[in-house]
Amino acid sequence: MLEGKEFNKRIRDSKGEVRQELFDKVWPRLRVLARSSPSDKYILVKHIIESKLNPNREVVAVTGDGTNDGPALKKADVGFAMGIAGTDVAKEASDIILTDDNFSSIVKVGENLETKNLNTIKKLLLCSFPGGDVGSQCLRFNCQVSAVSAYRQRGRRHCRLCRRLHY
């Protein structure tokens, strides 16, 4: 666990600038960033995306509920906003809205989803324009499932489609 103040000490040079090489020493071991500001969250997302530590670019998902979380939610590959406690700015900047504000929804879907079903789910999302109550209920479920798809496919199109249709 790292607090925002210590995080900033480790990733900034003597001039106060964030240095990618310093950041790359910190983020692979970082599990919890506590007492951090929304700008710390944005820096975390931006510099993980820009990191060259791995041959393939990292896919970044971030959660947020406040107005100041908007930039990080927008920058991330997949942004999750809270549907109950989240501000309108956070919801608009996100790709997925968790209607129950429950982080475990993301984990449960990921644990129960088989990779072979991802293409089926993507096709369903593209074809499931709401038509009555059944369509709406399917989209609420598929919105959570599409987060896993977007994470694995590094794309936002399906998440954005789902989010727009979800309202």
Image: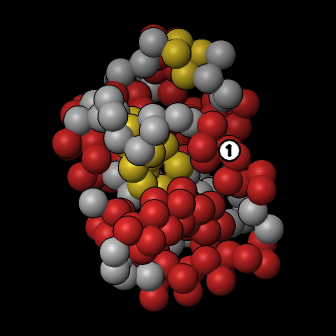
Q: Tell me: residue 5, above or below residue 58.
A: above
The coloring applied to the image is: secondary structure
In the picture of the structure, the residue carrying the numbered disc 1 is: 107
Tell me which corner region of the image, top left, top right, bottom left or bottom right, holds residue 28. Answer: top right
Q: Residue at x 44, y 45 (%)?
A: 98
Q: 126 and 60: which one is in front? A: 126
Q: 65 and 47: which one is in front? A: 65
Q: Residue at x 68, y 75 (%)?
A: 118
Under tag 1, what secondary structure? helix
Q: Residue at x 79, y 78 (%)?
A: 116
Side (left or right) of 56 relative to 122 = right
Q: Picture coordinates of residue 133 (x, y %)?
A: 38, 68
Q: Tell me: residue 159, above or below residue 8.
A: below
Q: Quadrant of the C terminus?
A: bottom left
Tell me which corner region of the image, top left, top right, bottom left or bottom right, holds residue 52. Answer: bottom right
Q: Is residue 72 something that shows in the picture?
A: no
Q: Tell me: residue 118, above or below residue 49.
A: below
Q: 137 and 142: which one is in front? A: 137
Q: Quadrant of the N terminus?
A: top right
Side (left or right) of 152 relative to 87 = right
Side (left or right) of 162 relative to 90 = right
Q: Which class describes the residues within 10 Å of circle 1: few (<14), some (14-19), or many (20+)?
A: few
Badge 1 amino acid: Val
Q: Picture coordinates of residue 103 (x, y %)?
A: 56, 36
